[in-house]
Image (cartoon, rainbow, N blue to C red):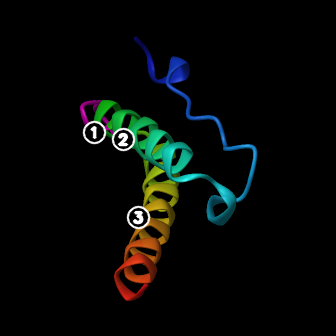
């Protein structure tokens, strides 16, 4: 597998509009791609973009957890 073949498609909707299942699936795809790129020498620049997307997903999941804890 080459770096050219590892892609993570953008979701059809903004992160805040994804269902919990869609958000979880997107997170898994991002984590898998990041792990793949971490094994590459040198690490491709696209890894930083994937990490930023993962950070957004984690923030959204954190926000949802806070909301459900306060409900």
Q: Residues within 10 Å of mark 1 (few under 14, many from 20)?
A: few
Q: Are marks 3 and 1 in contact (CB under 8 Å)?
A: no
Quick one: quadrant of the N terminus?
top left
Does residue 5 show up magenta in the picture?
Answer: no
Name the side, left or right, on which 50 lies relative to 37: right
Residue bearing the label numbered 1: 38
Q: CA distance from mark 3 to mark 1?
A: 19 Å
Q: Earlier in the sequence, mark 2 or mark 3?
A: 2
Outermost residue, bottom side: 70
Name the side, left or right, on which 38 lies relative to 68: left
Q: CA distance from mark 2 to mark 3?
A: 14 Å
What's the mark number on residue 58?
3
Q: Residues within 10 Å of mark 2 (few under 14, many from 20)?
A: many
Outermost residue, front side: 71
What percent of the width, then of the height, locates residue 39? 24, 31
Look at discs 2 and 1 and give the one toward the viewer: 2
Identify the main secondary structure in magenta.
Answer: loop
Does residue 41 show up magenta in the picture?
Answer: yes
Q: Are marks 2 and 1 in contact (CB under 8 Å)?
A: yes
Which image quadrant is residue 71 in? bottom left
Residue bearing the label numbered 2: 34
């Amino acid at each position: 597998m080459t770096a050219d073949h590892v892609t993570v498609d953008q979701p059809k909707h903004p992160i805040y509009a994804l269902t919990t299942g869609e958000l979880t699936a997107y997170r898994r795809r991002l984590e898998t791609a990041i792990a793949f790129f971490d094994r590459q020498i040198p690490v491709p620049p696209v890894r930083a973009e994937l990490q930023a997307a993962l950070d957004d997903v984690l923030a959204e999941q954190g926000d949802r957890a806070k909301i459900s804890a306060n409900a």
